[in-house]
Image: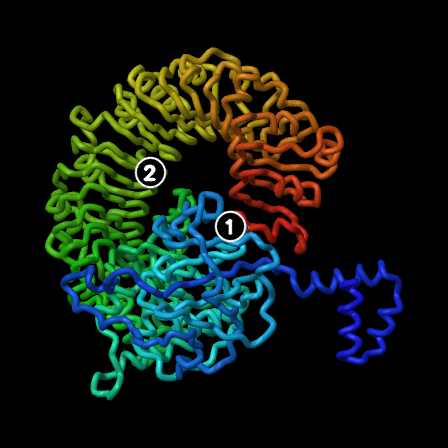
Amino acid sequence: MYFDCVLFLLNASFHKKKCKKILQLPISFRNYTFIILICRFLRPNNCIRIVIDFERAGFLENPATEKPLLLSLLNSYSRKKKYGSEIRSLRQFQPSFFASQRHFKVYSNQIEYHAPNAKNILPSESDIIEHNIEGIAVFNNKDFCIENLGDTEILLSEDTDMFSFDYSDDFIIKSKYFDELKRSGNNEIKLNIKDITKSNIDCVIFEECMNILKNGWNLNFAGLKKEEFLGLIWLLYDLTCYSDSDALLTFYKNLLPFIFLYLQDRSNVGVSNLTGADFINYNKYFLPFLYLLYETIDITYNSNRKELVLVEKKQNKNILSFEKHNIDEIMVRITPIALELISQENSKDKFVFLNCIVYSFKIKGIKISSDDIYFTEFKDLDFACNNITKHTTNYEMRTSFISIFSSLQSIKNNEITYVEFERLELLSTDYCFLETLKNLDSLILVKCNTSLNFLLCKLSYYFPKLRKLHIVGFLLLNGFFNHLHALHIELLDLSCCIYNGSSKDLNALRNETLKELRANYSRLNYKILQSFMLCKVLKFLSVRGVNFERLRYFEDHENWQNKFQYLDLSYSKLNQFFSEYFSSNIQVEILYLDQLNEIKYLKRILSQKSLHTTTKKLSLSKNLITRDILTHITAFEVLQHINLSFSTDNSLDFLNSEYVFASKLVDLDLSGNKLELTNLSFIYQFDCLSRLNLCHCDLSYGFMSHLSKALISSLREINLCGNKLCSSDISQIFSITNLVYLVITLDNKVFSEFLKEYGILKCLVLETLVLVNTNVDSDIENFIISQPILKNVELRGCKVNSNSQIMKININPLPLEDIV
């Protein structure tokens, strides 16, 4: 009957023939149609109503008051109005800087809020919603949250500003803060503005901000005061805004002219200028503007390395995204080309703003590389050193660093403790600036211009606090070594360096503070090496790839250091003298002996009793493993990690032995060896093994059944890529109860057979999955998505459908960028 009445009203109101025809339809069909119409107009649309109370409890300090040495900021914008006894419309306070229709819900004080109970209070578990939230009200009526269909008013209750709106997926610019509220499953929540932001934002500015988030309006404002502007950008930061379109980028671009306006001279009437205190106290809120300041430069902040990265733009980005950062200090990382582009694009406003932002942070250091590639960031030392020797010419800088970042030239140079220059021809201005950094703790110079040799002879004069020195790829003279003892260096890296001088003029004196020496692929004089080896506190020695055969005139090694935490002799060419020294009862905790030049030297070193009782990590990759060598290996007592990968001639026929360290071993690497199933039986004795690498071992079907049940329960990481797997192998892999890291190659046909036989299995603790040379079809894709706590996915040499769901899922830290 109710539906008939509604349809009759439709007919009377519109006199449409279609409505008349509807009245003639069967009752059941009419009822069904009407229900669809009602559901269409009253559906919740996955939204939450948020009611904001702007009454503040107590005085809120400006952030500048937290820094007593700075001038306090002007009081945040506030407006005072006297309200009558009646409810008044907020429209009378419509701001002059933005004129638009309102598309928000009416809030009426007729809604009665009761004291919340344990069932309807939104939990305060996250950092977004604080525990002191007052008056949270929850409504579970699903029909209460409806679509915004027209122009409505926002009403104010007496003595208090209230603002209400419906937040949904329709917002063009979204907020991670509001997203979390929406995910709570509640239909409505009441918050005080201080629960959202600590800025002194008022109801009017907040309303206009919500208008922009909802509709993506990005008009140019007029009359926005500095205090209102600072409150607005603070609010945007606290809301953690993001957008799938260019709406957020356009919004910030429209706000950028205000910054330039506030940077103008104070003689401008009516303009309240930004001060140094403003930039220092609001610096993280200004960062998004820095990201879009230049058309030709990509500017980002790397929170892991605390680096402000400025590199030349390779492609245009229309989407602005940024995260919250607790920044206490930054490292400026830039390229010479980026410096040139900034110089070309700079205006007075951009120059001042860039320097104000950089100056507002504590500057830890400076990194400049010709191509944004750094020697110190390579994990593969052999590749890194080869990369240095491959580059025969350096990039000649045309724009000096200090001409762009002039604010660092005075006070800030006392903060800088780290400098890294790589493959550059430095300008004299930057050279002079470098000399002023009296508090420098770490200096890294990688294959830079030879004029720096003069600086290397006076390091103790310019940098009295220097403790870490990396001089890589240089031609070193006597002057450097003769003055090195005057520094209290603790870490010295002379990798890829060549000594060019006469030993007659060399006064290399002992350095009593040297704890770590790296001389990989270097060519040094015997006197130089002698002075280093006499240092009693030396604990870390890496002489990878050094040709000791060319070093002569050593008399004895009686007083040389013989206790090391780390020793790397890999790829080195030992002579008789050094083989004797490294076999003279030395004690080493971590020992790398990859691909030694003589097997007799390897046997001699491994036979030491002192190593058997002290070495916890041993790497013998790319060596010939004979029965004698394996006998020495079995005698190690406290070994926890061993690497026998890529043995020459596949010389692992003697593995089935008893190992003294069996109960201690946690990491075994046999990758790159052709193994028979019988070779796997020796693994049974390693009950505590948690990491196993059998990558490219040419194992045949069914090899997983040869691993003991004890191993299945202890393993946490396993690499099986490049091996043949059958259904039972895959099943046993997924039965590893504590598996958190898996590297594997899957065959589509075998995996399909596995699914038919076993169904999709879930690894309950698997966090990282690396697929290698795999065609990711729908079956493999569904398997990935079904894993309950999977966090990291990496695809190496894999084929993936561009429309695949795996390309759309949000897995952090998102190694999906490595997809080939």
Secondary element at image label 2: loop
From the viewer's side, name the closer residue of 530 and 338: 338
**Picture disc at residue 546:** 2
In this picture, residue 209 sits left or right of residue 591: right
Residue 322 can be seen in this image:
yes
The answer to which quarter of the image holds residue 379 is top left
Amino acid type at mark 1: Ser
Q: Earlier in the sequence, mark 1 or mark 2?
A: 1
Distance of mark 1 from mark 2, alpha carbons?
62 Å
Percent coordinates x, y for residue 730 in the rendering: 65, 29
Percent coordinates x, y for residue 559 in the rendering: 16, 26
Amino acid type at mark 2: Val
Secondary element at image label 1: loop
Residue 647 can be seen in this image:
no
Percent coordinates x, y for residue 548 in the rendering: 30, 34
From the viewer's side, name the closer residue of 637 and 46: 46
Foreground disc of the pair 1, 2: 1
Percent coordinates x, y for residue 662 in the rendering: 44, 15
Q: What residue did someone put label 1 on?
A: 184
From the viewer's side, name the closer residue of 472 and 634: 634
Up-down relation of residue 275 to residue 264 (above or below): above
Contact flag, marks 1 and 2 (Cβ < 8 Å): no
For disc 1, the neighbor class at 10 Å (few under 14, some 14 to 19, many from 20) is few
Quarter in which the N terminus is drawn: bottom right
The answer to which quarter of the image holds residue 225 is bottom left
**Picture disc at residue 602:** none
The answer to which quarter of the image holds residue 419 is bottom left
In this picture, residue 305 sits left or right of residue 215: left
